[in-house]
Amino acid sequence: MAENPLITISIPAYNLGSYLPKTLDSILKQTYQNFEIILVDDASTDATADTIAKYAAKDNRIHAHYFQSHEGVSKARNYAIDNAKGDVIVFVDGDDLLEPQYLEVIARGLVDPSVDLVAVGYNWGWRGGSGSGNQFREVSKTNAYASINRRGGGFGGYTWNKVFKLSIIRDHQIRFDESLDLAEDLLFVADTFLSHIGSYFIRERCTQKSADQIVSFILQPGRCAARSRLSANTLMRWREKYSRKI
């Protein structure tokens, strides 16, 4: 891949008027500036749409789209996949805060042409607590289920700390499942990982904690529990689908 790949940043936003400005400011202040933002308002009822319009008007790298009805995060991310012009795509939530070197770390990891996916560390917090995740290990297809579903030190079945090659997503027609309210990110990671045999996963190794744990995010009240629960039916569906491929 080129030394300066175009990075597409997908941001779905629903009623995030009080969070979104800080998220966008953290992106616009990146040390790496070759990016585009696909920002989808999912029929918000607060000031989110106005915030999106304001930022899109002052930076032509921000491409705004407005759903007329509430469609969900998966449809918003699929819209970004369909309309992205980048070499790779990053899925950012509208309440995430990115450290200034986030995109630079990603770009460095993609210089090696054998790298198909980059995962980075992160800090996370909620009211009354905090934590981090940066203990990534080598992941193989034989232990994919355990690795992707493991919490804490595992590879993680979430998308917001990973960057994906758009060529892989499109070649294998990988989509977010719009029928799911939970675990859509786990299924997407599994699809991407298991559909491309040559995939190679890395973690940026840094000596400074601030550079190693590169993503921070703020959880809204109640969101932590909602997004951490995976239904038994969804996990069973995942296992049945991929046990035949491993």
Image (tube, rainbow, N blue to C red):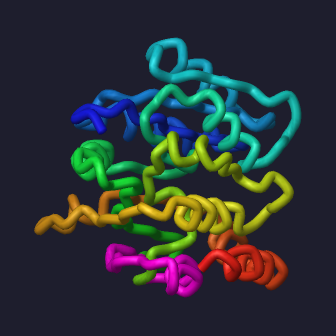
Q: Would you say residue 45 is visible in this rendering?
A: yes
Magenta range? 131-152
Residue 175 versus residue 97: which sits nearer the camera?
Answer: 175
The quarter of the rendered structure image containing the C terminus is: bottom right
Residue found 44% across the figure and 57% down from its top: 162
Residue found 80% across the figure and 62% down from its top: 181
Query: Does residue 84 sit above or below 159 in this rendering?
Result: above
Q: Is residue 217 left or right of residue 84?
A: left
Does residue 86 show up magenta in the picture?
no
Query: Does residue 209 sit above or below 114 in this rendering?
Result: below
Q: Position of residue 15 (x, y in %)?
A: 71, 43
Residue found 63% across the figure and 62% down from its top: 191
Question: Splitting the image into 4 quarters, where does residue 137 fall?
Answer: bottom left
Residue found 26% across the figure and 52% down from its top: 109
The quarter of the rendered structure image containing the N terminus is: top left
Q: Position of residue 129 (x, y in %)?
A: 47, 78
Q: Position of residue 83 (x, y in %)?
A: 62, 27
Q: Is residue 5 left or right of residue 160?
A: left
Q: Position of residue 172 (x, y in %)?
A: 62, 49
Q: Is residue 26 left or right of residue 243?
A: left
Residue 35 versus residue 211: which sits nearer the camera?
Answer: 35
